[in-house]
Image (spheres, grey):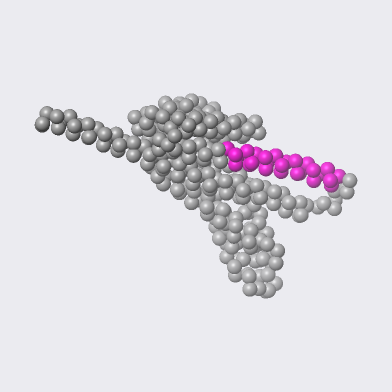
Amino acid sequence: MKSRLIPLLALVAALLLLQGCATGSVERARDVSSAAIAYSEATLAVIDVAIDAVIDNDSESQRNAPLAAVPAAQRAERLEQLDKGLVRSVQLYTELKQSVSTTRAYFIALQDLANGSQAEATEEAVKSLASRVGATSGALESDGAASGLSDEKVAALGGLAGLVAAQTHGAKVSRALSRDADIIGRALLLQEEVLKQAGDDIRAYLKASNNRLFRVRVRIPYEKAELGPDWVADRRTYLKTRALGENHASLQAADAAAAKMQVVWTRILGGSYTAGEIAASLNDSAELLDAVVILRAADKPQ
């Protein structure tokens, strides 16, 4: 009886060990998809703000431009040229949104694959989404998003597949990660490049709008000794936004989150990612966006 019991106990122990490994893989996949969802939602919000910012910045500059000095016959052509530039910017940001959204979908499908639900169909879904991520990267590159990439960063993409810890992820997830390592890595790299421009557009909007708020709603009323009921709130908004503008971390929030997500991706491949690693970067993004919302509300005409 004892001789039969020992192999049985060994089998049970092995099954429990396998179950623990499987549970660990599922938990890791859940952490990964949670990070990707949080990153994508924050980034999509940044892109929406950047689209409005780049348009509003240009429109405000035209309001202050000496248009009367421009011959009437040339004004329509001038406006058309300005609009063409803005349309290109909006198209680039729209392509960025597609890239981020598709990357988000990829990570969600990756979690489903780790969960083992409809394994074959899910494996094909992950593969298909990886192809779509690659296509969105191609669109970004065709619009010049790759122009700022260093040779070192591009070369590093080729080594990502070698980081995959097969013993940690399980067979199906490991196959997907090895196949898609450079595709997702390149997408995150391109997203960072475009988000640098988005950050510049948002920062320019914050600076211009805050200066206008200070001039019209804070300084001039103070000089005239005409401090209305909104002056206290307007001054508070101006000073908080000015302080944010002097905070380097907040100013770099948009592209910092994408840069952090690239680090997270390498740790995901190696099986060493832990939940919460990207939280600080996302908090900075939220702070930046909150400032834009508050400033927009204060900047509305009285």
Is 239 above or below relative to 72?
Answer: below
Residue extending farthest to the front is: 1
The residue shown at (72%, 49%) is 58
Identified at 41% across, 43% down, the residue is: 31
Count of labels shown? 0
Residue 193 appears in the figure: no
Residue 123 coordinates in the image, percent (x, y): 46, 31
Q: Image point 44% across, 34% down: which residue?
A: 118
Nearest the camera: 83 or 204? 83
Is residue 290 something that shows in the picture?
A: yes
Residue 174 vs 284, above or below: the answer is: above
Which residue is at 53% across, 47% downward?
A: 41
* Residue 166 locus on image (x, y percent): 37, 28
57 vs 183, nearest the viewer: 183
Q: Position of residue 198 (x, y in %)?
A: 61, 44
Q: Which residues are magenta?
A: 74-99
Tell me the quarter of the image containing the C terminus: bottom right
Q: For this view, does 247 lie left or right of residue 138?
A: left
Which quarter of the figure is the N terminus placed in? top left
For residue 74, which quarter of the picture? top right
Magenta segment main secondary structure: helix
Front-most of residues 294 and 28 = 28
Residue 206 occupies quadrant: bottom right
- Compared with 70, 173 (above or below) is above
Q: Is residue 195 magenta?
A: no
Tell me: 252 left or right of 268: right
Query: Does the magenta-highlighted stretch encompass residue 95?
Result: yes
